């Protein structure tokens, strides 16, 4: 399946629109989420635990599963999403990233995830979805983060004894 005419035309201005999957998008590598700088544009959504800096749009709960189990569950959620492609993975750091492509124009968004051990036991999750191009995303990144968090919560609930 190739890229359609609209994405090819858009690729004249937005190069990554003319690519397939994760092609054309730079992998973020291991991200220092403690020093994350968010853009001032509204085309992003950050979900993180209470007290995280920068302040998240959405607060993630404490997950009562091991960090490696939560990391695997996040990967399963990402793999089940339409038009989402693996971009980067650092299992030793419990970090990964994916590219989500819009249905019509093939615009790429990047979803970055970090799982951290919670000092109280269990895990904490940071989920950051952002657009590569533009200023507005019509709420797509926030909706994606909420959807993924719901799917992750369902997987965690299914793993509980």
Image: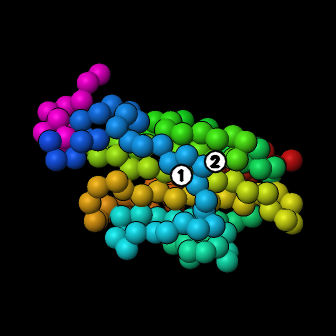
Outermost top residue: 1
Query: Residue 99: x and y, percent?
Result: 43, 43
C-alpha separation, residue under disc 2 versus residue under disc 1:
7 Å
Question: Is residue 81 left or right of 12 when viewed as pictured?
Answer: right
Whether residue 100 is visible, yes or no, is yes
In the drawing, does residue 31 fall left or right of residue 104? Answer: right
Query: Of residues 102 and 94, which is closer to you in this image?
Result: 94
- What segment carries the magenta color? 1-11
Is residue 9 magenta-colored? yes
Foreground residue among 88 and 43: 88
Label count reads 2
- Above or below, comparing residue 51 to residue 147 in the picture: below
Q: Residue 93 at what x, y percent from top left? A: 70, 47
According to the image, label 1 marks what residue?
112
Q: Secondary structure at mark 1?
A: strand
Q: Residue at x 54, y 39 (%)?
A: 88
**In percent of the image, x 56 and y 74: which residue is there?**
54
Of mark 2 and mark 1, the one earlier in the sequence is: 2
Image coords of residue 139 (percent x, y): 36, 64
Q: Is residue 105 left or right of residue 38?
A: left
Image location (x, y in percent) of residue 59: 61, 70
- The residue that label 2 is drawn on is 95
Q: Residues within 10 Å of mark 1 (few under 14, many from 20)?
A: many
Q: Quarter holding the N terminus?
A: top left
As drawn, 151 above or below 125:
above
In this view of the protein, which residue sits in the foreground, 35 or 102? 35
Labels 2 and 1 touching (C-beta < 8 A): yes
Disc 2 residue crowd, few under 14, some 14–19, many 20+, Cα 10 Å? many
């Amino acid at each position: 399946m190739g890229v359609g005419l609209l994405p090819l035309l858009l690729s004249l201005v937005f190069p990554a629109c003319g690519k397939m999957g994760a092609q054309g998008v730079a992998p973020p590598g291991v991200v220092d989420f403690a020093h994350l700088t968010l853009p001032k544009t509204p085309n992003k959504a950050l979900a993180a635990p209470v007290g995280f800096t920068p302040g998240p749009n959405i607060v993630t709960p404490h997950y009562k599963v091991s960090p490696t189990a939560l990391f695997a569950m996040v990967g399963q959620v990402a793999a089940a999403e339409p038009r989402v492609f693996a971009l980067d993975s650092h299992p030793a750091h419990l970090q990964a990233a994916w590219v989500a492509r819009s249905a019509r124009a093939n615009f790429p968004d990047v979803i970055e995830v970090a799982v951290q051990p919670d000092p109280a036991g269990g895990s904490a999750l940071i989920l950051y979805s952002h657009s590569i191009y533009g200023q507005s995303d019509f709420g797509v990144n926030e909706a994606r983060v909420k959807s993924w968090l719901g799917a992750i919560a369902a997987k965690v609930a299914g793993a509980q004894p």
